[in-house]
């Protein structure tokens, strides 16, 4: 190998080593970068009420938006909301377009291969809802009562597992028809996802409905890039404090009409 070749080879090795070192430093520096820039970029939904949507004043609002604001405030940095869809929320995290994903993100084995998760911060659930005046302390109390449900939906399947055999099912072809039937007084109860039900209650306060019974729970987690242990620890610290002081429970009741319950850590 000539002297020039050796120098080029050595230079190449040093450049490669520098790139590896830079990549390793970058992989572990998300929290430092956030604190240095004084800006936290959070991927949020803007079309999925009550977790994230645009209000009449054109400002984003919802449970996920409030959670993003809480984390930014506790970190002492400016919040930059990054609107995402279900399809692109994880790619946005992987490509550094967002530092965190707070967008009704559930945890499963496939997702855990590509991103990390915080402790859970909010419930995402299917349940039974009815007027506040109707006593429903247990599924047995649904005996003989009418229930609006979307045909074949998860709520339909889950309710069949636990409800008495003499429940009077009124099945509809989509969520809009199911909600419309309940709002119109055609049924005494409705089985629906918490998100859809909360929006129904928000838009129709006169029906005086509330959450009654839990069918299935699939809590929401904050998505964090792989290897960002310091950022994950900071987010978990904020979530734990907010759970302890009742902030998370208050947010959940405000937006979902249901407390956080026993969220996993």
Image: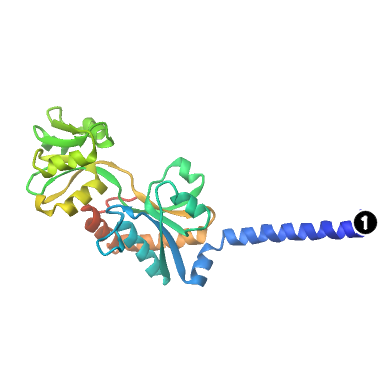
Where residue 35 appears, x then y in whole percent?
49, 70
Q: Closer to the camera, 223 or 179?
A: 179
- Give the structural element (helix, strand or loop) at label 1: loop
Q: Categorize mark 1 by other alpha carbons within 10 Å: few (<14), some (14-19), many (20+).
A: few
| Quarter holding residue 44 | bottom left
Q: Decide if residue 258 is on the left or right side of residue 67.
A: left
Residue of label 1? 2
Query: Coloured how?
Result: rainbow
Instruction: Give me the residue at 37% from left, 53% from top.
Output: 103
List x then y, in percent, for residue 13: 77, 57
Q: How many marks?
A: 1
In percent of width and height, residue 110 lies at: 47, 41
Residue 223: percent from left, percent from top: 44, 53
Residue extending farthest to the right is 2
In the displayed structure, 210 sits above or below 35; it is above
| Residue occupying the point 22% across, 56% down | 253
* Left or right: 144, with 78 as reference point: left
Q: Is residue 81 above or below residue 175?
A: below
Judge whether residue 137 can be spotted in this image: no
Classify residue 45 as left or right of residue 57. right
Any part of residue 85 in sight: yes
Q: Is residue 191 positioned above or below 254 on the image?
A: above
The reply, left or right, for residue 42 in relation to residue 157 is right
Residue with the most extreme left position: 133
Q: Quadrant of residue 100?
A: bottom left
Which residue occupies the foreground of this view, 241 or 14?
A: 14
């Amino acid at each position: 190998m000539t002297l020039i070749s050796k120098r080029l080879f050595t230079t190449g090795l040093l450049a490669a080593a520098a790139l590896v070192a830079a990549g390793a430093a970058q992989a572990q520096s998300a929290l430092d970068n956030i604190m240095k820039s004084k800006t936290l970029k959070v991927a949020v939904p803007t079309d999925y009420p009550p977790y994230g949507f645009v209000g009449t004043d054109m400002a984003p609002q919802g449970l996920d938006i409030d959670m993003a604001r809480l984390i930014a405030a506790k970190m002492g940095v400016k919040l930059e909301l990054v609107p995402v869809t279900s399809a692109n929320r994880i790619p946005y995290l992987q490509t550094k377009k967002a530092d965190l994903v707070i967008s009704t993100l559930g945890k499963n084995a496939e997702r855990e291969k590509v991103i990390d998760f915080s402790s859970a911060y909010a419930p995402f659930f299917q349940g039974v809802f009815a007027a506040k005046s109707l006593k429903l302390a247990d599924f047995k109390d649904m005996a003989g009562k009418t229930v609006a449900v979307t045909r074949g939906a998860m709520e339909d399947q889950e309710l069949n597992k636990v409800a008495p055999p003499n429940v009077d099912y009124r099945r509809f072809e989509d969520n809009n028809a199911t909600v419309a039937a309940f709002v119109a007084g055609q049924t005494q109860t409705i089985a629906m996802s918490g998100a859809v039900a909360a929006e129904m209650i928000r838009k129709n306060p006169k029906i005086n409905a509330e959450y009654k019974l839990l069918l299935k729970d699939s809590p929401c987690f904050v998505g964090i890039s792989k290897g960002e242990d310091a950022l994950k620890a900071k987010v978990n610290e904020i979530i734990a404090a907010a759970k302890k002081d009742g902030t998370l429970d208050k947010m959940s009741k405000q937006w979902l009409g249901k407390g956080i319950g026993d969220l996993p850590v």
